[in-house]
Amino acid sequence: MKTTVGNKVVLIGAGDVGVAYAYALVNQGTVDHLAIIDIDEKKLRGNVMDLNHGVVWAGSRTRVTEGTYADCEDAAIVVLCAGAAQQPGETRLQLVDKNVAITRSVVGQVMAVGFDGIFLVAANPVDVLSYATWRFSGIDHHRVIGSGTVLDSARFRYMLGELYEVAPSSIHAYIIGEHGDTELPVLSSATIAGVPLRRMLEKDPELEGRLEQIFEETRDAAYRIIDAKGSTSYGIGMGLARITRAIVQNQDVALPVSAYLDGQYGQEDIYTGTPAIINRRGIRRVVELELSGHEMARFTHSADTLRGIRERFFSPDR
Ligand code: NAD
C-alpha cells in the first residue's frame, strides 16, 4: 500500500450526516485537511464557509475546502455520505437501488484518480453499500470500513447507562449484524462497569424483559428521530469522527463497524456489523465475539437477510 502523507479526509455528500461529521471532525481537530464534495454546489459552498468560521475556536487547525475528485489522490480516508436518506416509515434496505447506483458512480470517480487510502462508508443500507464499495473499488477489503453498528451500539450503551446510572464509556455492549431491522444485542458478553450483565440476569429474571425493551428502543430509534426531525445526524457524525480518529491515530481500537467476514461467525463474503480492530491500515482484524446459541441464530438470520439483498446486485466473490 502506498503511504499517504498527512491526515487528509475527503467527505463525499454534505447533507445532514456529512455536515454533522464535518462539524465533529473540525471540533476535534483530528485531521489537517477536510475536502468536501457534493453535487449541490451552492449548499456545499455555504457549509464550507460556515465550518471555516469556527476553526479558530477548535483545538487545532483544519483546512476545510470545497473539494473535487482530484483531492482523493492523496487522501488518507474517503468518507461516503452521499445518497438518498430514509423517508419517514422507509426501511434502510428500501434505499438500496438508488444508493447502489450513487455508490457505483462515486467510487468509480474516486478510484480513477489513484486513491490509495481507506473508504469509510456511512450511506444506507450501510452493510450492502460497504460491500458495493469494496467490489466497485477492487481494493483489499481491509481498506473498506462501514459505520455498521457503531451508532446502534452507542445508542444501546447510552440507554443502558441511563438504566444503571453509569457513564456509557463504562459500559461495554455491542449491537451486531445488519445496521437495521435484523440487528441484535450481544448480552452474553456485555459488562456494566466491569460486572457481566449475564450475572445480573441470573439474579434478576425480570431484567431480561427490560433489556429487550431497551434493545427495541435502540433498534427503532432512527424511525422515531426521522419522524421527529427528518433525519438522524449528530450520533452518526460523532461515530464517524470516532472511527476516523482510530484510523489517523493508528489506534488499534476495537469498534463496532461493518466489516468483511471471511469465515468469522460461520459467514463468508458479506459485510456486516461486528467489532473489529481499526488502525491506519483500516480493519486490522475482525473480533469474533463468543455468542450464545440464541444470539448466533439471530446473527445468522441477519446475515442471510443481507446476503439476499446483496445477491440482487453481486454474484458471490468466489
Ligand atoms: P441528505 O439528503 O441530507 O444528504 C445527502 C447528500 O448527498 C446531499 O447533500 C446530496 O446533494 C448528496 N449527494 C447525492 N448524490 C450525490 C453524488 N452523486 N455525489 C455527491 N453528493 C451527492 O441525507 P443524510 O441525512 O445526510 O443521509 C445520507 C446517507 O447517510 C443516507 O443514505 C442515510 O440513510 C445515511 N445514514 C446513515 C447512518 C448510519 O448509521 N450509517 C445514519 C444516518 C443516515
Image (tube, grey):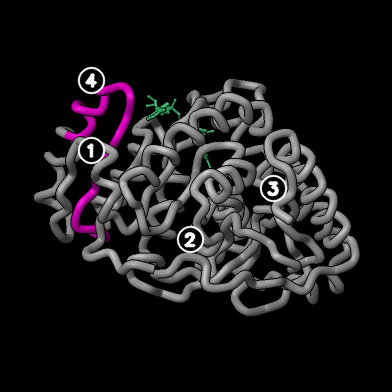
Q: Which residue is mark 4?
A: 42
**Of the pair 210 and 108, the residue shown nearer to us:** 108
**Magenta residue check for 249:** no
Within the displayed image, which quadrant is ligand 1 positioned in? top left
Q: Which residue is mark 1?
A: 67
**Of the pair 175 and 311, the residue shown nearer to us:** 311
**Magenta residue check for 44:** yes
Looking at the image, is mark 4 or mark 1 earlier in the sequence?
4
Mark pair 1, 2: CA separation: 22 Å
Residues in magenta? 29-48
Q: Residue furthest bottom?
A: 194
Q: Is residue 131 above or below residue 165?
A: above
Q: Amino acid at mark 1?
A: Gly
Q: Which residue is found at the position 38% from the left and 34% from the top?
A: 13
Q: Is residue 61 above or below residue 222?
A: below
Nearest-to-viewer mark from 2 and 3: 2
